[in-house]
Image (spheres, grey):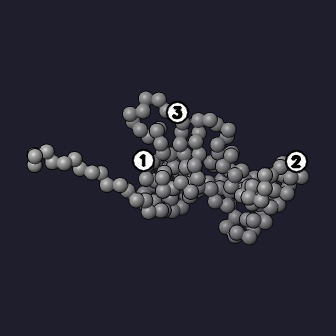
């Protein structure tokens, strides 16, 4: 993550990493994978400059022989480049997009591993999460 955020070669940066899933369960004797949710944003704050920089990067890669699947693959290359780098081809690491899956991730037991800015360890979840109430067992003394 520090490599991504500190390298000029990546157009995106990681602003949050949240651990969730079976790794946090104390009763699990064997962990099958590491579930992480990440939030990736463009390094360039100006959307137009970010789009132009991404397009320049895509054209340079095409000139080197890289093929893109389509329009969205080209437009979101800055995001997918960081996401794929973080995944690193590992079968053990399961990555999720925190913006898309935040409601699910933050509703389950989780631990914020890295937070830049508003994603402090004590920051409230960004999206309101509906929580189910636990049903109390009926009072048997009434019967």
Whether residue 18 sits left or right of residue 68 in the image: it is left
Front residue of 8/74: it is 74
Residue 2 in the image, given as x and y percentages of width and height: 63, 49
Query: How far is disc 2 from disc 1 in space, using C-alphas?
Result: 44 Å
Give the quadrant of residue 40: bottom right
Q: Residues within 10 Å of mark 2 (few under 14, many from 20)?
A: few
- Give the secondary structure at mark 2: loop
- Give the secondary structure at mark 3: loop
Whether residue 46 sits left or right of residue 140 in the image: it is right
Asked whether disc 1 touches disc 3, contact meaning CB atoms under 8 Å apart, the reply is no
Mark nearer the N terminus (1 vs 3): 3
Front residue of 34/123: it is 34
Query: How far is disc 1 from disc 3 in space, using C-alphas?
Result: 17 Å
Mark nearer the N terminus (2 vs 3): 3
Residue 12 in the image, given as x and y percentages of width and height: 68, 56
The residue wearing badge 3 is 32
The residue wearing badge 2 is 65
Q: Name the residue located 35 percent from the left edge and 55 percent from the top edge.
A: 132
The residue wearing badge 1 is 109
Give the answer, above or below, for where 50 lies relative to 94. below
Disc number placed over residue 132 in the picture, else none: none
């Amino acid at each position: 993550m520090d490599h991504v955020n500190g390298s000029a070669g990546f157009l995106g940066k990681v602003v949050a990493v949240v651990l969730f899933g079976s790794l946090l369960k104390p009763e699990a004797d064997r962990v099958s994978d590491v579930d992480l949710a990440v939030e990736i944003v463009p390094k360039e704050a100006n959307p137009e400059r970010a789009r132009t920089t991404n397009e320049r990067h895509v054209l340079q890669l095409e000139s080197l022989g890289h093929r893109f699947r389509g329009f969205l693959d080209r437009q979101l290359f800055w995001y997918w480049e960081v996401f794929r780098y973080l995944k690193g081809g590992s079968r053990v690491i399961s990555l999720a997009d925190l913006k898309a899956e935040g409601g699910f991730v933050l509703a389950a037991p989780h631990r914020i591993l890295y937070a830049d800015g508003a994603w402090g360890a004590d920051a409230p979840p960004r999206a309101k999460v509906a929580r189910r109430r636990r049903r109390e067992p009926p009072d048997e003394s009434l019967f």
